[in-house]
Each structure stands twice: as structure tokens, then as C-alpha cells.
Amino acid sequence: MKKFIQLLLPLLLSLTAAAQPQLGEIAAHLQTDRISLRYDCTYTEDTPVKLSGVLLIQGDCYRAVGNGMEIYCDGATRWSVDPASKEVYIEPANGLAELLEYRDSLSELKISELKYLPLSDDLSPFRFDTASLGPAWVVTDLR
């Protein structure tokens, strides 16, 4: 699961790249709007992997859902969830800034269904509650 998490994280960084004119517009809205979008891209480190899914961002918070994985980040904590394997990894996070190391690992980025939504004080979409998980789930807290 850790390797797959490393594959999804570069997608989030792509918002700061200049691969498409649309990305500059998105970057300009990072601190003023909640952003929702659909993404398709290829992670090019080692063996190329196609990634697709939905991304929600507000400030340093993000939620990426795609390729069978869910990643939630409230800016300080990241929950990487694999529902098929019933696994959750909880780790310290640095929000979007932690993703800069993946900047050159993406190609063929396509963004669709882009929406700018009002900022919200409700950050629950960026947190994952492990309290409701059943006994079959494995939760690894690395904080």
C-alpha cells in the first residue's frame, strides 16, 4: 500500500506545475477557494502507472480519491486508506508542501470537472475517522 500512496501523492503536486495553462489558474485559487477536480495522468517513476480520480483541495488540506485509494490530509495529518485491503496509515503531514519532491514524476496530466467552491470552516472532508471502522481493519498510526 505504501508504494501506491507514493504514486497518488505526485498528482497533488501537479497543481503547481506549468504543464497546462489551467494549472496557473488553479494555483491562483488555492488560498481563496475550495477546489474540486477530476484528474487523469501518468506517474513516470520506475514503471509508468496511470492514475485517475477526484481531488478536493482547500488551503493545505486535500482529499484524493482514485485507483481504489483514498488520501485525506487536514494539513497536519495524512490518512491513507485502502478500502479493499481494509488498511489505514496515519502519518504526520505538511499539507501540499510535502509534495514538491514529486514535481517531475507526472506526465499526460488532464484536468476536467474543475469547480471553485466557497471556502468552508468544515474541514471534515479532509479527515478520516477510524473510530467507526470494524475489527477487520488494520490501522497503523505512525504519528
Image (cartoon, rainbow, N blue to C red):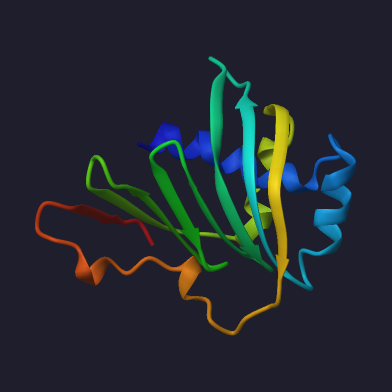
Quadrant in the rendering for residue 14:
top right
Q: Position of residue 92 (x, y in %)?
A: 47, 60
Compared to residue 87, the image places residue 42 above or below, namely: above
Quadrant in the rendering for residue 84:
top left
Q: Is residue 117 left or right of residue 84?
A: right
Compared to residue 72, the image places residue 108 above or below, namely: above
Residue located 60% across and 21% down the image = 45
Q: Position of residue 82 (x, y in %)?
A: 32, 45
Please state, as top left, top right, bottom left or bottom right, where the C terminus lies in the image.
bottom left
Can residue 54 be seen in this snapshot? yes
Compared to residue 14, the image places residue 142 above or below, namely: below
Specify the farthest residue to the left.
135
Residue located 40% across and 43% down the image = 69
Q: Nearer the viewer, residue 115 or 78?
A: 115
Residue located 57% across and 17% down the image = 48
Q: Position of residue 10 (x, y in %)?
A: 62, 39
Q: Is residue 107 left or right of residue 127?
A: right
Please state, as top left, top right, bottom left or bottom right, where the N terminus lies in the image.
top left
Q: Is residue 44 left or right of residue 51?
A: right
Q: Position of residue 61 (x, y in %)?
A: 59, 65
Specify the farthest residue to the top.
47
